[in-house]
């Protein structure tokens, strides 16, 4: 079984206001990859997003990068179906409870809500939007994802 982490890009890894990676993101990506996780990136945008990801030097961390006009559940499902994964130790990390967190819960994965930035005040409206974990720093993301494997 494989452990995977599917990450949102904008406002999860990348801060568009600062035009830079969110502090700690690169370290966590590198650490998870070294610890045997397969990483996937899902982003909503046009072809220029791929160029941005490449210019940030993070492309090599991901097994696959999905860039689409709209983030759809199907994009996440295709990643999950393409691997024989351990759902109880695979994660979706995102900043939107109404998008990534909802989709992750619907797919039966562990969900990590990075509660920072523009959507930090977005409140889960339904049970399916409630994250498995809520974090405020990249260090907490790493602790949440890596801890179940070393317990």
Image (cartoon, rainbow, N blue to C red):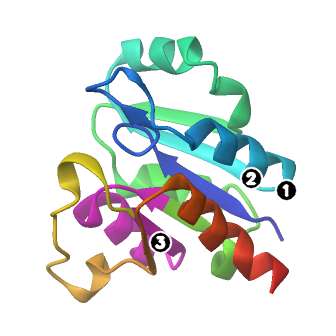
In the figure, residue 146 lies in which quadrant? bottom right
The image shows residue 8, relative to residue 145, as above or below, that is: above
* Earlier sequence position, callout 3 versus callout 1: 1
**Where residue 151 appears, x then y in whole percent?**
80, 87
Q: Are marks 2 and 1 in contact (CB under 8 Å)?
A: yes
Q: Is residue 127 left or right of residue 22?
A: left
**Mark 3, secondary structure of its residue:** strand
Mark 1 burial class by Cα count in 10 Å: few <14, some 14-19, many 20+: few
**Residue 105 bears which disc, if any?**
none
Residue assigned mark 2: 32
* Earlier sequence position, callout 3 versus callout 2: 2
Q: Residue at x 49, y 11 (%)?
A: 51
Q: Residue at x 42, y 33 (%)?
A: 14
**Residue 111 bears which disc, if any?**
3
Q: Is residue 142 left or right of residue 49?
A: right
Mark 3 burial class by Cα count in 10 Å: few <14, some 14-19, many 20+: many
Q: Residue at x 58, y 15 (%)?
A: 54
| Label 3 vs label 2, nearer the camera | 2
Q: Are marks 3 and 1 in contact (CB under 8 Å)?
A: no
**Residue 35 bears which disc, if any?**
1
Q: CA distance from mark 3 to mark 1?
A: 19 Å
**Where residue 150 appears, x then y in whole percent?**
83, 79
Q: Residue at x 71, y 39 (%)?
A: 63
Q: Is residue 108 magenta?
A: yes
In the figure, residue 9 lies in which quadrant? top left
Q: Is residue 70 left or right of residue 91?
A: left
The image shows residue 31, relative to residue 114, as above or below, that is: above
Q: Which residues are magenta?
A: 93-113
Q: CA distance from mark 2 to mark 1?
A: 5 Å
Evaluate whether residue 86 shows in this view. Answer: no
Evaluate whether residue 126 shows in this view. Answer: yes
């Amino acid at each position: 079984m494989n452990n995977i982490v599917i990450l949102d890009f904008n406002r999860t890894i990348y801060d568009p206001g600062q035009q830079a990676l969110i502090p700690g993101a690169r370290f966590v990506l590198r650490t998870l990859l070294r610890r045997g996780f397969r990483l996937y990136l899902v982003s909503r945008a046009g072809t220029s997003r791929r160029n941005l990801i490449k210019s940030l030097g993070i492309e090599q961390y991901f097994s696959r990068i999905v860039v689409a006009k709209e983030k759809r559940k199907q994009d996440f499902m295709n990643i999950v179906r393409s691997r024989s994964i351990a759902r109880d130790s695979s994660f979706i990390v995102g900043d939107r409870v109404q998008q990534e967190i909802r989709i992750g819960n619907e797919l039966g994965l562990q969900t990590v809500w990075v509660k920072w930035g523009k959507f930090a005040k977005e409140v889960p409206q339904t049970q399916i939007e409630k994250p498995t974990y809520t974090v405020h720093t990249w260090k907490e993301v790493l602790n949440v994802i890596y801890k179940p494997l070393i317990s």
